[in-house]
């Protein structure tokens, strides 16, 4: 039921103020049901600093009304309700309290629930955007609660207002705030397997090497000889071709070959094998497969340009190309890709197999969408006999123009200006380094 007398008194005061020439700010407008809608915060209230911090485990998304949870339906995106916190205080008649909170990246929806103990007291709930424009309110009557479910939210600072519309004495209230954080995800199957990167620097600190005594290449030579063949000289070739003594080249290794093998060799070696009297550990088998993929062709599946020094563009690969590769290769085709994660002269290749993106519209420029993109990589800093996928993640920040499904421009942002992938590629087929004595079919015999 409306409080007719109170509504009339507000209007009378407002008209009287205009007649005597007093300027009142902000503008107060009566809504059709007689309650107040305000474009700017009412004077006299106290702006609170933040939502009061509580243990997030004391509240969970499951406590949201089912009608709210069930309305989040999407086949192309996923997300989670994030509980931000609780605010609590008391208001007297016609008193205002204001609160502020920060919606996190990926926010698309805000849900606020306000409650109090005495339904004879009437409180109203308002929400303003980052620029103090009112975007929604809840002004029910004869209840002990108000709620706002704002469905076009975004990452920004937001403000809440609690108004004691018709209160006897003082009324204690409690409110809770959730945001729905939407993510856009893709995942390749199967995941690439982890393996050792087989450094080339002849230094015990960088062992094991492919050319070590009793290493993968020497075992391959022995296997061939024990089968009645001539020594192919694989270990000698490896020592002469894939070895360095220059500490400046400590980053040289087989990371690109391992990354290609981890993607294309979908049957990962998982057990040691004894063939023709030769013991092949898991690491030996993975090492031989790695050597076989040293020079895999890409057949056009290469995005970006390798950075070779100051004369090259450090911003390449450009974020819109990077974004499109993730959507097309990992997202649409469920295919892993290899990324050089270092934007400098050094090259560190890792297979990327999963991503999760959050989109945030630019408050000042509607043509831009800011993206927070986390990518999962298989790691090669593992024991050679490691089985499975040991992963690490890197998070990249950039903005896009031209939309998010097929963007045409953009730029790296934040830490990603100097820390972003250099190039991306996908191996098409097996090919060893030129002159390599390994026979791929023989290697497949060993690992099968």
Image (cartoon, rainbow, N blue to C red):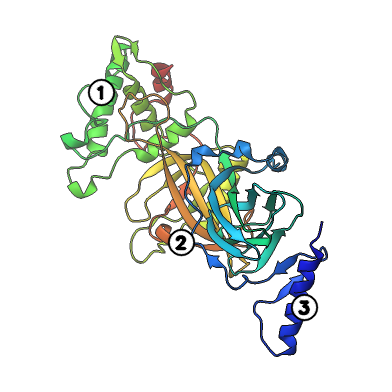
Side of 392 where 247 appears, left or right: left
Residue extending farthest top: 277
Q: In this view of the protein, can residue 336 be seen by the observer?
A: no
Side of 307 where 198 appears, left or right: left
Residue assigned mark 2: 413
Whether residue 232 is situated above or below residue 14 in the rendered picture: above
Residue 152: image location, x then y, percent: 67, 57
Residue 337: image location, x then y, percent: 49, 41
**Can you tell which of label 2 and label 3 is closer to the viewer?**
3
Q: Are marks 1 and 3 in contact (CB under 8 Å)?
A: no
Spatial CA span between label 1 and label 3? 97 Å
Earlier in the chain: of badge 1 and badge 2, it is 1
Dividing the picture into quarters, in which one does residue 67 lie?
Answer: top right
Local SS, label 3:
helix
Earlier in the chain: of badge 2 and badge 3, it is 3
**Can you tell which of label 1 and label 2 is closer to the viewer?**
2
Residue assigned mark 3: 12
Q: Are marks 2 and 3 in contact (CB under 8 Å)?
A: no
Earlier in the chain: of badge 1 and badge 3, it is 3
Q: In this view of the protein, can residue 63 be seen by the observer?
A: yes
- Residue shown at the point (60%, 73%) measured from the top left: 43
- Residue shown at the point (70%, 90%) measured from the top left: 21
Residue assigned mark 1: 218
């Amino acid at each position: 039921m409306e409080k007719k007398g109170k509504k009339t008194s507000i209007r009378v005061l407002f008209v009287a103020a205009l007649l005597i020439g007093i300027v009142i700010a902000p503008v107060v407008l009566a809504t059709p049901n007689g309650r107040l809608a305000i474009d700017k915060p009412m004077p006299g209230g106290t702006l609170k600093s933040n939502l009061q911090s509580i243990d997030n485990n004391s509240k969970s998304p499951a406590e949201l009304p089912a009608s709210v949870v069930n309305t989040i339906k999407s086949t192309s995106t996923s997300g989670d309700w994030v509980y931000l916190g609780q605010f609590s205080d008391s208001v007297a008649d016609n008193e205002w309290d204001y609160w502020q909170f920060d919606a996190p990246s990926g926010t698309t929806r805000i849900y606020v629930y306000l409650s109090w103990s005495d339904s004879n007291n009437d409180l109203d709930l308002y929400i303003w955007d980052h620029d103090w424009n009112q975007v929604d309110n809840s002004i029910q009557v004869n209840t002990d609660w108000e709620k706002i479910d704002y469905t076009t939210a975004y990452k920004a600072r937001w403000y809440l207002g609690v108004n004691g519309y018709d209160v006897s004495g003082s009324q204690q209230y409690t409110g809770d705030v959730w945001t729905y954080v939407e993510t856009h995800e893709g995942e390749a199957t199967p995941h690439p397997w982890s393996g050792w990167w087989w450094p080339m620097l002849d230094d015990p600190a960088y062992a094991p090497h492919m050319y070590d005594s009793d290493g993968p290449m020497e075992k391959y030579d022995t296997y061939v000889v024990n089968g009645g063949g001539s020594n192919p000289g694989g270990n000698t070739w490896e020592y002469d071709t894939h070895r360095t003594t220059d500490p400046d080249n400590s980053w040289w290794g087989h990371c690109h070959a391992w990354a290609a093998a981890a993607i294309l060799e979908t049957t990962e070696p998982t057990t040691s094998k004894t063939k023709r009297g030769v013991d092949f550990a898991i690491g030996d088998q993975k090492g031989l497969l790695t050597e076989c993929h040293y020079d895999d062709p890409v057949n056009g599946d290469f995005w970006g340009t390798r950075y070779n020094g100051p004369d090259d563009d450090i911003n390449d690969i450009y974020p819109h190309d990077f974004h499109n590769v993730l959507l097309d290769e990992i997202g649409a085709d469920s295919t892993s890709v290899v990324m050089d994660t270092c934007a400098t002269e050094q090259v560190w290749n890792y297979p990327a197999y999963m991503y999760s993106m959050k989109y945030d519209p630019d408050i000042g420029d509607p043509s831009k969408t800011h993206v927070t993109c986390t990518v999962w990589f298989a790691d090669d800093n593992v024991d050679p006999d490691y089985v499975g996928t040991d992963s690490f993640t890197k998070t990249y920040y950039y903005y896009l123009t031209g939309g998010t499904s097929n963007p045409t421009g953009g730029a790296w942002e934040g830490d990603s200006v100097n820390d972003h992938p250099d190039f991306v590629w996908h191996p098409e087929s097996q090919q060893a380094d030129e002159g390599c004595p390994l026979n791929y079919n023989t290697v497949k015999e060993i690992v099968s």
